[in-house]
Structure formats: structure tokens, C-alpha cells
Amino acid sequence: MTSRKWVRLFLTTLLWGGLSGVLVSFFAKSDTYAKALEPFSIFEVLGLIFMFLGLGFIFSVISQMGFFAYLTVHRFGIGMFRGIWPLVQVVLIAFTLFDFVYFRYKEADGDVALWTFFVVPVALLIYGLAVSYVKAKETNQKAFIPALFFMVVITSVEWIPAIRANDPSWMMLMLVPLLVCNTYQLLVLHRITGDSQNKTETADTTNQKSSGNAKSKKKKKKKKKKK
């Protein structure tokens, strides 16, 4: 990836993070906007919008740090674990989802129903599966597990500051920009680097070779019949 493409990816991801941060703030922090509207103050509303825009930018930077850190970890994992690296990732995914339920339920001391702690992990897993399916479809099947690992494990690690705060509004305010930025980076990377194009070109070349071989075989059969 050239520096120009990297800067483009950084800026577009930053924009997605900022916009998603502002949009989700209208729902997650509706009470904060309500205070600025009674009485109505345009400066307070604009101040809130710029504040949540800035938070979206920060969450976007966290997402990008996690993304490039994962690319390094992924290459390290391939070199260290080799063929069992996909299995290691699956185990880490399961461990992360289990911890997500167990530790939050333990902190609640049984005051909240257990099933409520499964909602977010299951939703995160379903969303990760959907994104991973798209990634694998656009590149190759081997990309499915790494994509799922990134969407579940890395997103959970990036989300830790909001999880520790244990405030539902702040958790949602941080999670949505992280998911938006992580999804965008994951699905746009192969387009920027040209992996999907190389895959298509390889497939076309293979098809051309197979069709050429089939034609040559037919010609040889015809020559034998003439003889």
C-alpha cells in the first residue's frame, strides 16, 4: 500500500467515525440534546455536535490503531502457529464471547437476569459473521475466520474503555463508530490493495488456460481421426 492510499484510507475512515459518532449521539445522548433545546440554544447544540464529532474521530483513530495492530498480529500468528492459526483464532473468539458474558454478570452480583448479558455478544457475533461472509465472498474463503476474529475480538478490545465505564449510553456511543470503522476498513482494504482484482484476473487466466487446453485436445483428436 502506498502512502497516498494509506492517507486516503485514514481520512475516509476518520470521516466515517465522526459522522457515525454524531448520528448515534442523537439516540444515545438524547437527554443531553434535550437540555440544550430547553431553552433552545444554537451554540449549545452546535457545541454538542462538534463534541460528539470529535469523539467519533477519536474512536475512529482507536479503530485504525486496532486494525493495523491486527494486521501485524495476523502475520505473526501465521508465522508462529502456521496451519493451526485459524483454529487458534476460533478459540480466542469463543473465549472473548465467554468472558464478555461471565465478567459482566459477575460484576452485577446476580442483580440482573443472566440472559440480558448474552444480547450484546450474540449481536456482535451475528454482525461479525455477516461482515466476514461478505469479506470471504469478495476475496477468498480463507479470509472468513480472520475477518470474524477482527470484528469480534479486536472490536471488543477497542471497546474496553466504554465497557469499564459500564454506562449503556457511552457503550453504544463508542461501539457504533468502532463497528462502522472496522467494517469499512475490513471491506475496503482488498479493494485498495487490489487483492480482489488479482483474484479475478487469476481466475480469468485459469479459465483461459483450461479452455485453451480443451481446444488443443479437440484439435489433436481431429488429427488422429483424419489419419
Image (cartoon, grey):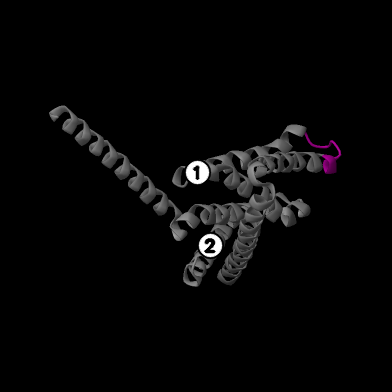
Q: Which residue appears at 78% of the width and 53% of the height?
A: 164
* Furthest-right residue in this view: 109
Residues drawn in magenta: 106-113
Q: Which residue appears at 64% of the width and 59% of the height?
A: 72
What is the number of callouts on the image?
A: 2
Disc 1 on helix, strand or loop? helix
* Furthest-left residue in this view: 226
Q: Is residue 92 magenta?
A: no
Of residue 202 and residue 23, the one placed in the foreground of this image is 202
| Residue 181 percent location from the top left of the image | 56, 57
Left or right of 73? Residue 7 is left
**Tag 1: Cα neighbours inside 10 Å, few (<14), some, or many (≥20)?**
some
Marks 1 and 2, the one that precedes in the sequence = 2
Left or right of 109? Residue 120 is left
Prevailing secondary structure of the magenta residues: loop
Q: Which residue appears at 58% of the width and 72% of the height?
A: 43
Q: Which residue appears at 54% of the width and 45% of the height?
A: 143
| Residue 185 percent location from the top left of the image | 53, 57
Above/below status of 38 relative to 89: below
Mark carried by residue 177:
none
Mark 1: amino acid: Ala
Mark carried by residue 13:
2
- In the picture, the quarter occupied by the C terminus is top left
- The residue tagged 1 is 136
The answer to which quarter of the image holds residue 34 is: bottom right
| Residue 186 percent location from the top left of the image | 53, 53
**Tag 2: Cα neighbours inside 10 Å, few (<14), some, or many (≥20)?**
many
Spatial CA distance of label 1 from label 2 is: 21 Å
